[in-house]
Amino acid sequence: MRHLLDTHALLWYVLNDPQLSTTATRTILDPANDILVSPVSFWEIAIKVSIGKYTLTGTHEQFVEECLQQYRLSLLPVAPAHTSLVAVLPYFRHHKDPFDRMLVAQVLTEGIPLVSADDKLDAYGITRVW
């Protein structure tokens, strides 16, 4: 089964952070699952690195390569259908993160779960694994 990682789940997995839940870890490590990452997450990480919120041990390019090669994550490209759905997603006052909105659009369009600790995303009617 395909699952998309939220940005924090991606970071916590790669950094072996204990904040990653047991269920999320099992889902990611299950060889029957195809674990996807969106370029949106790489973009979000790049922005947070540039403003000093995150520090990577190497370059951003090395981080992306490590995610795709060493951790064998698959890329889920942003498609026009994903961006079209963002245009009609409800806009909740308690949740305005544009990166999350695109990830939500991707999982809704693809009909797949999102691996995420963010329960605010449930308001969009997604399937969330945590």
Image (cartoon, rainbow, N blue to C red):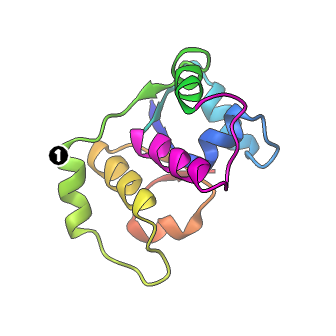
- Looking at this view, is 11 or 88 the one in front? 11
Residue 120 lies, with reference to residue 72, above or below; the image says below
Measuring 82% from the left and 44% from the top, which residue is drawn there?
18
Q: Residue at (37%, 48%) from the top-left corner?
A: 107
- Check disc 1 and report the residue beneath it: 80
Residue 32 x %, y %: 53, 20
Of all residues, the one furthest to the top in this rendering is 69
Q: Which residues are magenta?
A: 39-59
Whether residue 64 is visible, yes or no, is yes
Percent x, y of residue 63: 59, 28
Q: Is residue 49 magenta?
A: yes
Q: Is residue 127 above or below residue 17?
A: below
**Viewer-nearest residue: 34 or 81:** 81
**In the displayed structure, does residue 111 sit left or right of residue 73?**
left
Question: Neighbour class for label 1 at 10 Å: few (<14), some, many (≥20)?
Answer: few
Residue 30: within the magenta?
Answer: no
Amino acid type indicated by mark 1:
Pro
Determine whether the residue tagged by mark 1 lies in a helix, strand or loop: helix
23 sits to left or right of 4: right
Residue 117: x percent and y percent? 63, 57
Quadrant of the image for the N terminus?
top left
Visible residue check, residue 6: no
Q: Position of residue 113 (x, y in %)?
A: 45, 46
Q: Would residue 91 be found to the left or right of residue 100 on screen?
A: left
Q: Residue at x 58, y 23 (%)?
A: 62
Quarter assignment of residue 74: top left
